[in-house]
Image (cartoon, grey):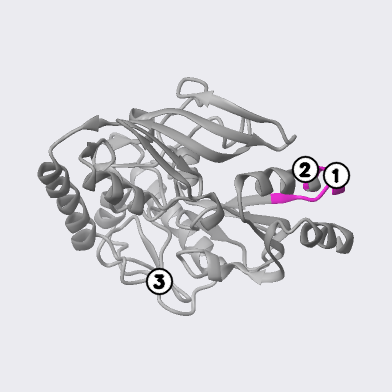
Amino acid sequence: MNEFISKLQELNIGIVKENEPLANHTTMKIGGPADIFIEPSSIENMIKTMELINEYKVNWTAIGRGSNLLVSDLGIEGAVIKLGRGMSKLEVNGTEVTAGGGYSLVSLSTQLSRQGLSGLEFASGIPGSVGGAVFMNAGAHGSDISKILSKALILFENGKVEWLSNKELMFSYRTSVLQKERPGVVLEAVFQLQSGDKDIIFSEMQKNKEYRKETQPWNFPCAGSIFRNPLPNYAGKLVQDAGLKGHSIGGAKISDMHGNFIVNTGTATAQDVLSLISFIKKQIYDLYQIEMHTEVEIIGRK
């Protein structure tokens, strides 16, 4: 492992740290250390990182802005690669937009709205990265990434880089082919948007932001929606109807504002959150015979 780290530093890959607390890199402010934390300074260095990972046979995990993650208290074995500032290019060519995997989704929707480009209004309050959004087909307000994505540049674990079309990404509700069938990292994404009226676009974005502000607990560290909606039912309403809002285990609490959010009241551990998730699953199944499945990605040592 020392030789692997030395090689990363020798090639000037970007930021390289040992035993970096991942609580510093998740919106829930929870997570033990990464054995090695890497934030490549460019797409080229991201590719070099994957080549080294393969050469030294190091386990790896990619993260973005950490908005849909619950990281184990024991941390993550091997290398954690963060898609950050070095992966945040932006090119606008008419209504076609190319964004780096590390670009903030909120910033992207704001930037494009100022240019009169419509299609990303739904994302104005989603605190993730472009890469993470493509990976999980992020969505809100009746739309999602699959509606506007043309193609994405993917780095696969064997080091191969390939463009995948919208169809090849096999999008469905909060999923894509990248999660299980073909694990990979989103380096860039190309979106096809539409020209629109700036004032109308801005108004729609503000409405979406206000709705989130009024209904979701962004004043506490959280990871966004914990469960996928078991359609035609909605996770938050099931939890609310079951009288579970406000229930807590340790420092983890079901939000008083929204039943599908678990917040960190200040001292929560990943185990607290996992115990609360298990509690909710059991209660909802016992009451309604509905199985709840997590939307938040749970990663790290067990």
CA neighbours of label 3 inside 10 A, class few (<14), some (14 to 19), many (20+): many
State the residue position of label 1.
Answer: 55
Q: Are marks 1 and 2 in contact (CB under 8 Å)?
A: yes
**Is residue 79 in the magenta section?**
no
Q: What is the C-alpha distance between the residues marked 1 and 3?
A: 45 Å
Horizontal side of 199 relative to 31 (left or right) equals left
Can you give x and y, in whole percent of width and height, for residue 20 in the image? 66, 70
Residue 23, by quadrant, is bottom right
**Residue 241 visible at all:** yes
Name which residue type carries label 2: Glu
Seen in the picture, residue 8 relative to 194 is either above or below; the reply is below
Dot 1 alpha-carbon crowd within 10 angstroms: few under 14, some 14 to 19, many 20 or more: few
Residue bounds of the magenta highlight: 53-60
Pinpoint residue 41: horizontal percent, then vertical percent.
Answer: 61, 55
Give the numbered dot on residue 51: 2
Choose the circle earlier in sequence order: 3 or 2.
2
